[in-house]
Image: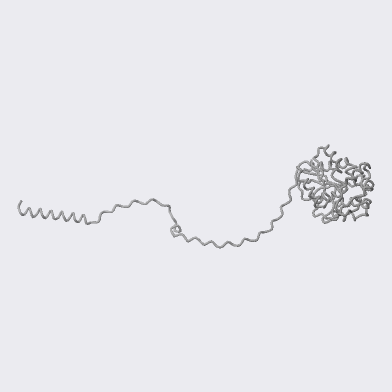
Amino acid sequence: MSPKRLICAAALCLWFAGTGALAQTAAPAVEPAAEPPATPAMDSQELEAPAPAPVPAAPAPAPAAAATPPPPPAAPMTGPVRNVVLVHGAFVDGSSWNGVVAKLQQKGYHVSSVQNPLTSLADDVAATRRVLARQNGPTMLVGHSWGGVVITEAGANAPNVAGLVYVAAIAPDLHESTMDLMKRAAPMPAGQGITADATGFLWLDRGKYHADFAADVPENLTRVLSAAQQPISAKAFNETVSQVAWKEKPAWYVLTTKDRAVSPEVEKFMADRMRAKIVPVASSHLAPVSHAGAIADVIDHAARELSRQQ
């Protein structure tokens, strides 16, 4: 090769070498980065850094608990009146109702006769409420003599007591006692035969039991009744009622016109005051024994009347 051609070839080699070096030193082409995944749109508030959580304030002291209001009285039961609870008085026990029980059972009633301890009003009320609690459905509550005080207290706020029947019974008003009512008339003959023993219990003289307590009961029966009489605590006759059932329940009153233990005049006063339906019976004080059929009829009539009102 001629010198001239050698010089040209060398020049070309130098040019290509420079071009390659320039290509190697130039920054490599950057490929576009992958597009990030789409994110939900955010408003300007979301882009800001979240505010620090507030420090909870110390709890305010709880207000004093208000007094719990008393529950409303239970609604009265509805349906036919098929239960009868009988409450005896002083100087007898639950067996004094035996004739009435038999008559009412014949009429299809479920009958219970309470055995009062006659130790205090509270004790007799408790005994009556135990029997009332066992009744399934509306009930007639019946009291004789001192038993009227008991049903006046026990029948109040008792939802299963549909009505009251008082048989020659004491029917006090609020904070009123038996003695408060007996003083409304002259002393009755039976009262003269009542004496207290050393323990404070009252007994009715056996010799006066027939004439002053059960004059229309056969004497052979009154001898048995007087032998089995239940004395009553003297303090009971001075105890007052704290609630009055006849102010909230319909009442019937058997007024014994030949009574020598509770004045018929006082009986009429009590019956009128309670607006009871009065049924006069020409009977001694012990009408549940001497007039068992008539007393059962009054109870049956009262129960039927209340059943029709359901």
Q: Where is residue 154 in the image (x, y as percent from the top left)?
A: 79, 50
The colour scheme used here is one colour
Q: Where is residue 181 in the image (x, y as percent from the top left)?
A: 88, 54
Q: Which residue lies furthest to the front in this view?
A: 198
Point out the image quarter for the C terminus.
top right
Position of 42 with respect to 88 (left or right) is left
Residue 58: image quadrant is bottom right
The one of 260 and 76 positioned closer to us in this rendering: 260
Count of numbered circles on the image? 0
The one of 288 and 42 positioned closer to us in this rendering: 288
Q: Where is residue 231 in the image (x, y as percent from the top left)?
A: 87, 50
Q: Which residue is drawn at 44% across and 55% down?
A: 42
Q: Where is residue 294 in the image (x, y as percent from the top left)?
A: 88, 41
The one of 288 and 27 positioned closer to us in this rendering: 288
Residue 138: image quadrant is top right
Q: Residue furthest left?
A: 2
Above or below 44: residue 212: above
